[in-house]
Image: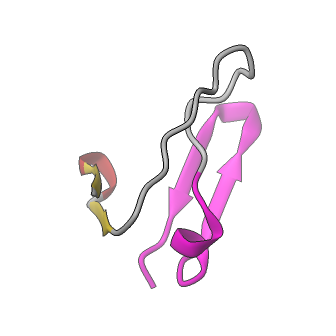
Amino acid sequence: MRMLIPSHGLIYEGPFIGASLDGQDICCLIGRDVLQSRILIYIGYNNQFTLSLL
């Protein structure tokens, strides 16, 4: 499957797993396999994130 976030120019191709996140106030989970070669910065009070493509 391919994950595309156009506003960040991010494309990731690989295996994805779907799961119900109902009732957990979660929109998306990003696994460690995706994050292992990137840097994720999350600013909670602004509800913003930055994901580098290093």
Position of 39 relative to 19 (above/below): below
Q: Residue at x 60, y 61 (%)?
A: 31
Whole-percent x and y of residue 20? 59, 27
Question: Is residue 33 a member of the stretch shown in magenta?
Answer: yes
Q: 32 or 48: nearer the eye? A: 32
Whole-percent x and y of residue 39? 59, 74
Q: 15 or 37: nearer the eye? A: 15
In which quadrant of the rendered view does residue 36 lie? bottom right
Question: Is residue 2 a member of the stretch shown in magenta?
Answer: no
Residue 46 vs residue 50: left or right?
Answer: right
Figure quadrant of the N terminus: bottom left
Q: 41 or 21: nearer the eye? A: 21
Q: Residue at x 53, y 57 (%)?
A: 50
Whole-percent x and y of residue 2? 26, 58
Residue 47 vs residue 4: left or right?
Answer: right
Which span is picked out in magenta? 30-54
Q: Residue at x 71, y 21 (%)?
A: 25
Q: Residue at x 64, y 34 (%)?
A: 47
